[in-house]
Amino acid sequence: MRRASELVVLAATLLAAACDRPDALVLCHNANCAGPPDPDRDDTIAALKASLALEYGGRPVIDGIEIDVFWNGARGRCEFAHDVETDRSPALAVEAAQMIAAGFSRSGPIAWNDERFHVKMEIKDFVGMSRHDHHTAAQRAAHAACTFDLYEIWRDAAIRAGRPIRVIFDSLSPTLLRAVVANPRWPGKHPHADVELALSADFLDPTRTGLGNPTLSEFEGLPLDIVEYHWNWVTDGQYQAWRSMGLETTMWMFSATVEAFDAIETLRPTYILTSEAPLVRRWLEY
């Protein structure tokens, strides 16, 4: 039997462990984080609306939201979509942007952190059914223009409402990010005090699934602020390189498992990108 003093030490240790949650920001993955993970609802207006309405303790559950911005090569338009879907008609990206912007004028906090709402655009690097169906130069320029249109919707709404925001331009493709940064409309050339900007690079799957896993050297010369990874695919070498460069990190997770929570505690990302925001929020605040 443990002595009373040992039990006190054990209780204190367990309490310290429970309170040692990372100070991470919660982003809603694919604008779909209100219910159990369901990829069929990813990047839909219905899921976006439900996700923005999530509350916990009278405050918004999330610190920000991710939307996929897809250039549909067949339709020649910028869509709020993960990829080409034959069984539904995706909304235009501008519709999703306007719904997010409308939330800036709500009363009370607009994000859990009560300081700044974070909007992340994942700029998709393909234009058709195949991930090998890449942009032409003209499509890259049109896709970049779309991201600036969305940014300006959020910028103008945030300034009108007096709400600080951060807009993250993110992609797996170094070529697309270069097209964005090189464009005369790149907002990094015209910053605003209450509208922060960030450039983010995706590092996805190192296995042979076709998702792609660029090397850090491919992003050389780009003013990166953030790198994104899946907790089960990152290598120690990648992680140590990113940290040595002072980069912020976004840890992506689809299902909230014990292993995923362990990874959060170990890797302590800046952002947690999740399809289960209410569960992750409760865990962080436990």
Image (tube, rainbow, N blue to C red):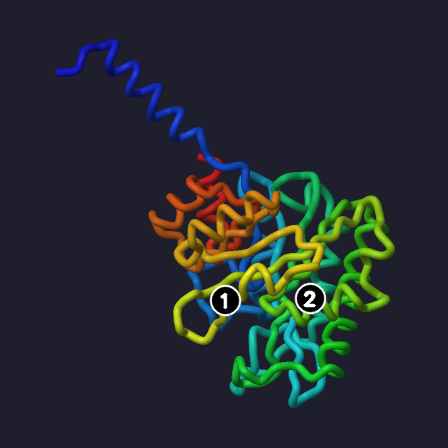
**Residue 227's x, y, as percent?**
58, 54
For the C terminus, the quadrant is top left
Amino acid type of the residue tagged 1 in the rendering: Asn
Q: Residue at x 61, y 72 (%)?
A: 124
For the N terminus, the quadrant is top left
Q: Which mark is residue 118?
A: none
- Residue bearing mark 2: 177
Q: Residues within 10 Å of mark 2 (few under 14, many from 20)?
A: many
Marks 1 and 2, how far apart in space? Answer: 15 Å
Amino acid type of the residue tagged 2 in the rendering: Leu
Q: Residue at x 53, y 54 (%)?
A: 273
Q: Of helix, strand and loop, which one carries label 2? A: helix
Outermost residue, left side:
1
Between residues 248 and 259, which one lies in front from this camera angle? Answer: 248
- Residue bearing mark 1: 213
**Residue 186's x, y, as percent?**
81, 63
Task: Classify residue 75 as left or right of residue 8.
Answer: right
Q: Residue at x 66, y 81 (%)?
A: 135
Q: Look at the numbered discs 1 and 2 and tell me whether their residues touch, using CB distance below 8 Å.
A: no
Q: Of helix, strand and loop, which one carries label 1? A: loop
Task: Classify residue 214 as left or right of residue 111.
Answer: left
Residue 256 at least partly seen: yes
